[in-house]
Amino acid sequence: GAVVSQHPSWVICKSGTSVKIECRSLDFQATTMFWYRQFPKQSLMLMATSNEGSKATYEQGVEKDKFLINHASLTLSTLTVTSAHPEDSSFYICSASLGANVLTFGAGSRLTVL
Amino acid sequence: EDQVTQSPEALRLQEGESSSLNCSYTVSGLRGLFWYRQDPGKGPEFLFTLYSAGEEKEKERLKATLTKKESFLHITAPKPEDSATYLCAVQTRGNTGKLIFGQGTTLQVKP
C-alpha cells in the first residue's frame, strides 16, 4: 500500500518552455503532498506543500510564479516549471501524506533544460 | 533554526563489516525522526520512524535508535546490496508532514 507515482520519470526541454510533472497517490487519498528538489549529491530541499483544494504553501526563496503547483484532487498534484532555464535542471520528487506523517515518496522526475 | 546533520558523508565498508551512521538534530520540538534509503536516480524509500528517546526499530540488517539529540542507524554485517545513500529527516511539532532532511550518508559495501 501507499504507492506514489510520478510522471514523467525524466524530461528534456528547451529553455523557455514549460514542463508539467504529475504526482499521484495510487491506493490512498492524500490531502497533502510535498514537492522537493534535489541537486546532484545533495539532499532533498522542500519547495512547497500542496493542499487539496487550496493554494500551495511555498518555502522561503521558492518562486511561486515559476513553480506552479495545483492539487485539484485527493490523488493528484502537479508541478509546472514555467519558462524553464538550465538552472532549473534538477531532480524533482514528490511525497504524499496519509495524515500527520509523511511516509511515501515518488520515484522522482529528472528535468534537463537545454 | 531547525537543523539536521549526518555523518560521515561517505562510508566504505567491507562486506560483513558492521558500522553506524549518525544523525544529529536540533529542532524546536521533535514530532518524529525518519530514516530513508535512496538509490541513485530514485526517490527515497522509507525505512523507519522513531518518535521518542530510547526507541529502537529493526529491519533485517538495519537497526535505528534515537536519543534526545541524535539517531544512529546501525548496519550489521552489511552486504553489497546495502550500498545506497541513507537519509535522515525530522518532522517538527506543528508541521503536518513537512520533513527537514540531512545531507545523507553514502554507503558503499565492497564484496
Image: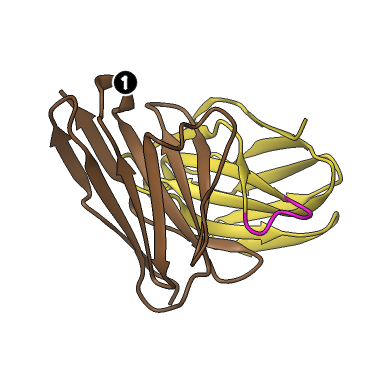
Q: Tell me where residue B103 appears, x and y as whole percent.
A: 56, 30
Q: Is residue A111 left or right of residue B65?
A: left
Give amino acid for label 1: Glu
Magenta stretch?
B92-97
Q: Is residue A85 left or right of residue A94?
A: left
SS class, disc 1: helix
Quarter of the figure with the C terminus of chain B? top left
Residue in view at x 36 percent, y 42 percent:
A92
Above/below status of A84 relative to A79: above
Residue in view at x 35 percent, y 74 percent:
A26
Query: Which chain letter goes with mark 1?
Result: A
Residue in view at x 49 percent, y 66 percent:
A52
The count of marks equals 1
Query: Chain B: what color?
Result: yellow
Query: Chain A: what color?
Result: brown
Q: Is residue B85 left or right of residue A19?
A: right
Q: Which image quadrant is residue B24 in?
A: top right
Residue that mark 1 sits on: A87
Does residue B96 show up magenta in the picture?
A: yes
Above/below status of A98 relative to A111: below
Residue in view at x 50 percent, y 44 percent:
B16
A56 or B84: nearer the viewer: A56
Most frequent secondary structure within the magenta stretch: loop
A103 or B19: nearer the viewer: A103
- Whether residue A36 is visible, yes or no, is yes
Q: Tell me where residue B70 appears, x and y as whole percent.
A: 78, 40
